[in-house]
Image (tube, rainbow, N blue to C red):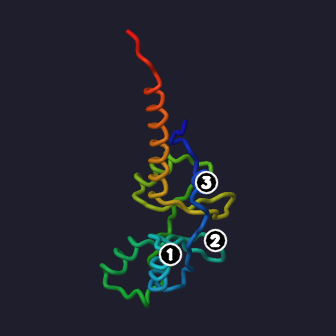
Amino acid sequence: MGTISSTVRELLNLKGRDVWSIQPEKTVSDALKVLAEKNVGALLVLEDGKLVGIFSERDYSRKIFLLGKSSKETRVEEVMTNEVCFVTPDTNIEECMALFTNKRIRHLPVMEADQLIGVISIGDVVNKIICEQKFTIGVLENYISGYSYTV
């Protein structure tokens, strides 16, 4: 029976390991184009293949738009989030949900042996939990409907 003790590895195997990224010296305008083109809410910021930050729609709205800065003149490294929480493939889904909630974030890079191997979002985790709960409900309904009561 499925439980929410599934791991990030299982989730990545289902959703894929695509990672959308940008270099820190690119402009915020460049980043916004990639966000729109890929229909994602955040980009990992990579320098020489190494994770150095994350740039999200939230970074744009709070650090560019609301402050009246120019997205064509501001570089990603000036407004990206530098302290990036990450998980490993063996992290369980419940731990990911706790990180999303406690850190108030929506994306978690997945690192294995100092290598970036994927990224998961809160939406990915919620969908996984819903699927597992539907499976559990189906098993329980089959069990209950197959069980005969006698008095």
User: At numbered mark 2, what does the secondary structure look like: helix, strand or loop?
Assistant: strand
Q: Give the mark, 1 or 2, whose residue is nearer the N terminus.
A: 1
Which residue is pictured at 41% across the width and 16% down the height? 149
Residue 79 image offset from top left, x and y in percent = 44, 77
Total residue callouts:
3
Q: Amino acid at mark 2?
A: Lys
Residue 77 image offset from top left, x and y in percent = 50, 79
Which residue is pictured at 40% across the width and 86% down the height? 71
Quadrant, the N terminus = top right
Q: Give the mark, 3 or 1, whose residue is nearer the N terminus.
A: 1
Q: Are marks 1 and 2 in contact (CB under 8 Å)?
A: no
134 up-or-down from 66: above or below = above
Residue 29 image offset from top left, x and y in percent = 44, 86
Residue 16 image offset from top left, x and y in percent = 60, 62
Residue bearing mark 3: 88
The front one of 33 and 136 is 136
Residue bearing mark 2: 50
Frontmost of labels 1 and 2 is 1
User: At numbered mark 1, what does the secondary structure look like: helix, strand or loop?
Assistant: helix
Left or right of 114 on screen, residue 108: left
Which residue is pictured at 43% across the width and 27% down the height? 145
Residue bearing mark 1: 38
Q: Residue furthest bottom?
A: 73
Q: Amino acid at mark 1?
A: Lys
Q: Are marks 3 and 1 in contact (CB under 8 Å)?
A: no
Q: Are marks 2 and 3 in contact (CB under 8 Å)?
A: no
Q: How busy is the neighbourhood of tag 3: few (under 14 within 10 Å), some, or many (20 plus)?
A: many
Frontmost of labels 2 and 3 is 3
The front one of 133 and 109 is 133
